[in-house]
Every structure is written in C-alpha cells, then in structure tokens.
Image (cartoon, coloured by chain):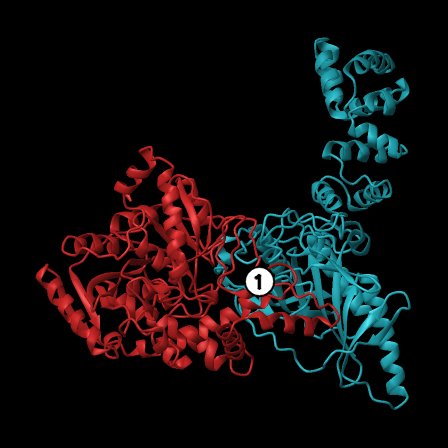
Chain colours: A cyan, B red
Amino acid sequence: MKIGLEIHVALPTKTKLFCRCLNQDNEVPNLNICPICMGFPGSKPMLNREALRISLSITRALKCKTNDRVSFVRKIYFYPDLPKSYQITQLYEPSGFDGEVNITGKTIRIRRIQLEEDPAKILREKNYSLLDFNRSGVPLVEIVTEPDIYSEDEAHEFLYELRSLLYYQGIDIDREMKADLNISLADERVEVKNITGIKNLMDAARYEIKRQSLLIEGGRQVLKETRSYDESRKITETSREKESDEEYGFIYEPDLTEYYSIDVNIPVPIIARHIAHELSVSYGFNLKTLSELIYFDKDSLRLVEYAKNKYDSQSIINLLEILKRFDCTSIKDKVFDALMDLLKRKIDITKETIIKLEKGMQIESVYSSPERIDEIIRAFLQKNTDMVEKYKKDRKVYDFMVGSITKNFGLQSKLVSERLSIVLKDIIDNN
Amino acid sequence: MTETIEEFASVDKPPSYYEKLNRDINELNNRLHAFNLLSKIDRGVPFSVKDNICVNGVESTAGSPILKGYIPPFDATVVEKIKQASFSFIGKTSMDEFGFGTFGINCDTPAKNPFDEERVAGGSSSGAAVATAILKHHIAIAESTGGSISAPAAFCGVVGFTPTYGAVSRYGLIDYANSLDKIGVMARNSSDLRYAFDIIRGTDDYDSTCTNRAIENFSTNKLTVIKELVENVDSEILEPFNSLLDTLKGQGYSVEYKSLEILKQSIPAYYIISMAEASTNLAKYTGFKYGHKNMEFTENYNLFFTNSRTAFGTEAKRRVILGTFVRSASVKNRYYFKALNIRNTIIAALKETLKDSLIISPTMPVFTPKFSEVKELTPVQNYSMDAITIPPNLSGLPHMSFPYTYLNGMPVGAQIVTDHFNDYALISFLEAWEKSFKPKFKYNIGAI
C-alpha cells in the first residue's frame, strides 16, 4: 500500500495574501473584501511578507530545500469561486522542496511546499449557489508528500508529527485543514479529493483501504479514478471528473517580482520530536510521557527547558502533568518553582493554588497557617545553620533572615517576622 | 509644465474658459472620436486618461465591449497623484480594445488623425495622441505595451514618452501584458512632459514591480542607428530620417551604425509573451461581476463563461486563442520559455549598446496609413508595424517618439531610446531638439 498526501493549511496572518483585507472568519459574507481579492480590473496583488515568512519557516521545519529566489505563477482555470480565473500559486521556484518528516523507523519525504491564495467559498443551495469572497485571497500553504506512507498507523503518526511541526509555526491544523489523499493498494492510484479535517482524512483512508482490499481479494480491478468523501455516510464515491491531466497553462505571475529567501529572517524551527529525544537522552525523561506533554504545548516545553537543570526529570513530569490537567501550563517560572516546592513537601496542589500563586496571593491562602510557615522557616534554617550561629552573636542579622525567607518562598514579611522569632527561640532553647 | 502650470493654477481664469474648452472638445470629439467620455471640467490644467486606466467613478472599459458599464471604485495611482497636483480630469481617451492594435481601429469608433481624417491616429493610445494634438494645454496619461505610446504620438505629431518599466506604478491599469505594460505621458513639449513625469513616477505600495530607483540624466552625444531597426523602413520615411541624422550631426552629435541580429527575434518574442499574459488577464472577464453581464443562468458554468466571452472583439479573441496555445504544457518550452530567454538576450544586447549612446530610429516603418489601407493588412503584416517600437518595449527601456518633420502635411516621428532609469536623458535630448524645431498643430483648443 502506498499513500501520498496533499495538505492545505491556512496561515495565521493578520491580512490576506495579496491585499490588506483582514484574514479572519466572518459570519457576515463578503465583508472582508476589496478590489484586489475580488479581482477587479486594474487591481494588482502585493505580497504579504509575513505569509512568505511563515511558508519559508514551515519549509525549514520540514527540512526542505529552498530556492534563493522564490517566484509565483498563475494557474489558469475557470470556476465561479476564482475571481481572476487564475489562482496565484507557486510552481517553478516554490517556497520549499525535497524535505522530510521523521516518524518511527522511517522518513516520509516531502515533495513540495507552496504558498498560494484560497478561492472564495461556494455556498450551495438547492437551485442556486452563493459566493462568499471573505475567504478569497487567504494565504494557504500546500504540503505535498511523496507516496511514502505504507500503513494506516504510519499515516496517523505522520499527521501527528506534521500537526506538531505546524503547531510550533503558529498554525492550528485542527481549525481548518483540507487534504487530497492518493492511495493505491494495487497498481492504480485512487485520488480522494477535498477532504476536510484530520478525522475525515483518516476515515477516508480507512474506507479506501477496505474498499480496495475487498476488490483485490475478489479478484477485481481497482480503477484509476478521482473520488470524493461523503462525511455523513463515511464513504468515498466516484466523482465525475475527467482523468486526463488538466491543462492549467501556468505562466510566471508578472505582477509579482522574485523574492529572495535569504532576506527573510527565520528562527531555528522547533521540532518537538527532536527536543523530546534529546531531553530523554540527556536528562532521563520518559520519552513517551514527555512527548505527550510537549508536542502541542509550547508552554510546557518552555517550563521543561527552564526546569531541566534545576529538578529531576520525574518531578518535572509529575508537576507538568498536574499543570496540564488544570490547563495551567502558561505559568511564570517563579510559580513553577513554588509549586515544585509544594510538590516536594507533598502538599496538595489544586487549581486554586496555582491561580492564587499566579496572582501573587500565595501568602494568605497557601501558607496562611502558622504551622506551615514554621515548617518552611525550620527547613530554611536547617539548610542555613550558619545564620543561626550568626544570629546568636548578633541580633541584627534577624532582618536579613526575614528578608531571605520572604524572598525565597514568596511569603509576607510580616508573617515571617512574627513566626521567625518564635522558631529561633525554640531552636536555640532546645540546643 | 512650468509656464502652463503658472498660467492656469495661479492666475484666476474666468469659468468661461472651461466652458469654451468643453464645447470645443465636444464639437471635435464628434469628428475625431478622441474621447469616449467627458466629465465636467473643473479648474486646473486639463488631463486626459487612456481608457484602460481606472478613474474612480468613471466608466473604464479599456475600449472593450466586455467591460461596458465597469465603474472602478478606485483611482489608479497615477490618476490619484495627478489629481492631487491640481490637474483637472477631462475625460477618458479611446483606444484599441485592451491595447491590442497599432492603428486604433480595434474599437467601436476609431479615432481619426487630426491632420488628415482619412488617416489613422495610430494605436493603441489613439485618443491620447489626438487629444494632445488638438488641445493646447493638456497632459495625456497613456500606456504602452509594445509601442502604444510611440506609434500614435508619431502619427499625430506629438511627444510620446514611455518611461522605464517600474518607474511608474501600474496600479489601476487594466492589464494587457503585466510584464510589458508601462504607463507614460503624451505632451506637446519637454517642459509639460518633465512636469507630468515628475508627478506620476515613484514607488507605490500597491505595485510590487514599481521601484523607487533614482531616475538619472546621463547625457551623451553619441547616437547609434541599429541596422535591424531601419532595414525594413519605407524609403519615403528613411529619407527624412537620414536628413534628421545630418541635422543632429550638425548640432554636435556623432552617429554610429551597428547590427544587432538578435533584434530580428523581438517581434515573435514580444507577441508570444504579450499574448500569453493577455490570455490570462482576459480570463477574468466571465460576465457576472462587472462590465458586460451575461443574464443567461440556465446553463452550467462552463457554458455560461463561454457565452459571456463572445463579447470580446476579434483581435481580443485571436490573442486569447494564441496566448492560450503558447503557454500550453506541450509547447510551452518551444514558445513561452524560449521567448522569455530571447527577451533576456535582447535586453543584454540593447543595454550594451546603450552604455554610452542613445539608440535612434524612425518610430514607424511607414507613412501614416489611411483607414482603407490598414483594413487590407493581415494580422502578421499588422504586427510587423511594431518592429521598431517593440525592442525597447520588450526590454522595459525608456523611449520617446518626437516629431521632427512634416511630409505632405503629415507629421513624422523619430524614436530615441536610453538605458533603464536614465529617462531624463530623453527629456534633455528633447529640450535640445526643441531649440531648432517647432512642432505645428492644426488645432489649438484652449488657446487664449
């Protein structure tokens, strides 16, 4: 079995690809439109540099090669949702080519990554259709794989990896993703076009695997054809499309110049798979658990990076799992430390604790009981026995001790001051 | 436009002047078809706009029935700039449909040459040239893809200036061939030309191909005549052109002769690229968003689009078919890509020559033809009329046609070319030329 995918994702830019209309969902049709995304005669496209930057960044995350000069083409076809009757896309010098995504034990090759504009949305009614141009000109990236996926599991893992890579490029692939699925169990390739969402893509793949297996088992031929996926019935059906290669008559887009990829500043991409692997080797994290925590959570990843040299890996994982459960991974480092301390002392962490710590309200709530504060002070003094000795000689050290404890544990100095004298007296008296 | 600007902008003219101007233009328009729309004339120096350049709220059809009724909701960048400079928009000027033509005849009502109404005005910016030839104080915003400014300027005896590709924003231009289209100016003299060019040039946030590169004025006394540009010129045109060279030599210019074989390929390269691009630009005219509306909604969308496109004129249809062919997958390498390579070779060859000289030639290879003569030409004969104007246009090089003599009462123009972004050298050349040559006009509407 061979599967190849063509995946379209919308880029999270403020404005559209070639005009200054907002790139956002709008319930009111035809609100985010202008002469450019409507293709009015006289209008010209102007490239959104941020969209180009994101496309090149994805290219890098997927280990693609990039041309020094990136160019655009016109892809000409007639359809009511295409205002200029051509789509501005990439062909000869795309944003990326020859890349790869690693999954367990193998590599899925990426053939091409191209930046292009989305057409308008067609709303089909019974006897007529309506057009909504809010989507016209929204930047898309199309990611085309080689037919390197050989099983359902591999498809699943590839999509999981891809989603994580794109997540770290700021793209929510779950929000809107469209895919074309090329799948062949026998010699002939079947293409299932325009599948929306990962779940439907996997369902369509499963259906095709079953359908084609049954045909082969029954000694029948799998036909080379284009099919479509029916979400409600969870089946694929033959679409009445011609099988000949379509003639798009591509030419260079002469309204856009060439863009030098070297001029675009791209930070090193975050590849969660690699990071998880390195951390597990260097710090002893459990690979599977760590991966689950950081694949789709940049805050967790940040906390792991922050904590990896301070705490042992299992404690970090334990705390992160708690934070994740409360949906609280975006906390400050200081709060993380405070929580780590609570965890160490086996004090229960509740969502309320975290929220209060975040708001700087820890004193009253978390450490309000004099016994708890005494406990903290004793622990502190045990570590700093020299301070007690100094105190014995010079009572002026008292204020300094209050300050240190207050700062280290985020307590209120008044409370510390009250309890410290009692604890000190107790320690000195008992020695 | 120093003198004329002062005359109109600072001196308080009575409104009756504009009323008279309006009346005069209307009257002449009935005969010459230069304008296809006239707005109310306000105060300020009059300027006209070729019909393929958008003016907010004014029907802009690019001379095509398929755009009938298209009223753009925005000004082209050049129009915006020139309006801000207190010029007064007086109307859209007629043209060959989408710029497809050399004689101005590919439209409903072809403009007539003001020097002889049996003869063509030239194209595709026919109305712009006629308007410049009949109005005393006026700037015409025109556009050239393969010679659409030079040709009519030569036939109508005015100055036609086509700037470097990228020096003037194309935003708001209804595209013919985007990699070749250039907005330029027609005027009667160098000062008007310089004034208008300084207003319209410069970078634009709405056109990526428009640059902010400085425009230079590297002058030279060396003129080059290229064999391939003059060898097919009619002898009745070549004779006065040789006299022009003698006159220029007398004024201190040196003249060199040179052969550039590659220029023989400029007509096919130009027509392949321009038609390939034009056929994609014309794809958007599907008859349901603007312009010509197809109200037959009973068929499927493919038939609907096909039927809508019957509104194109013959030349437009020819270019859609040829342009679609040359970019189709099976022949693209033989035509489209090859033409792109030839263009690069031609640019390099011309730039080499232009390093230290200006290229001079007649503008048109023939004497201003009559309408009856033009009708007899085959498409290929028609296209060959652009042989001299195509090389600079294909290369995006700044060039200018200027009147230099009169033959049997008709003006004759010569074309001068300089290197990219050295546009001012052309205007400087014209300033020098004006010292010894005063153009004549049959009409001087607006003269007081």
**Is A425 or A265 nearer to us in this picture?**
A265
Residue corresponding to mark 1: A95
- Outermost residue, bottom side: A219
Q: Residue at x 55, y 69 (%)?
A: B280
On screen, residue A193 versus residue B84, left or right, reads right
On screen, residue A379 versus residue A46, left or right, reads right
Q: Residue at x 29, y 71 (%)?
A: B368
- Local crowd size for mark 1, using a 10 Å CA cut-off: few (<14), some (14–19), many (≥20): many
Q: Residue at x 80, y 61 (%)?
A: A197
Above or below, B117 relative to A38: below
- Outermost residue, top side: A395
On screen, residue A18 versus residue B297, left or right, reads left
On screen, residue A91 versus residue B202, left or right, reads right
Q: Position of residue A255 (x, y in %)?
A: 50, 60
Residue B164 visible in the snapshot? no
Give residue B406's quadrant in the image.
bottom left
Q: Position of residue B78 (x, y in %)?
A: 43, 49
Secondary structure beneath disc 1?
loop
Above or below, B413 relative to B45: below
Give residue B129's quadrant in the image.
bottom left
Residue A225 visible in the snapshot? yes
Q: Position of residue A368 (x, y in %)?
A: 87, 20
**Is B99 or B372 nearer to us in this picture?**
B372
Pointer 1 indicates a residue of which chain?
A
Above or below, A364 relative to A112: above
Q: Position of residue A284 (x, y in %)?
A: 76, 51
Amino acid type shown at disc 1 = Ser
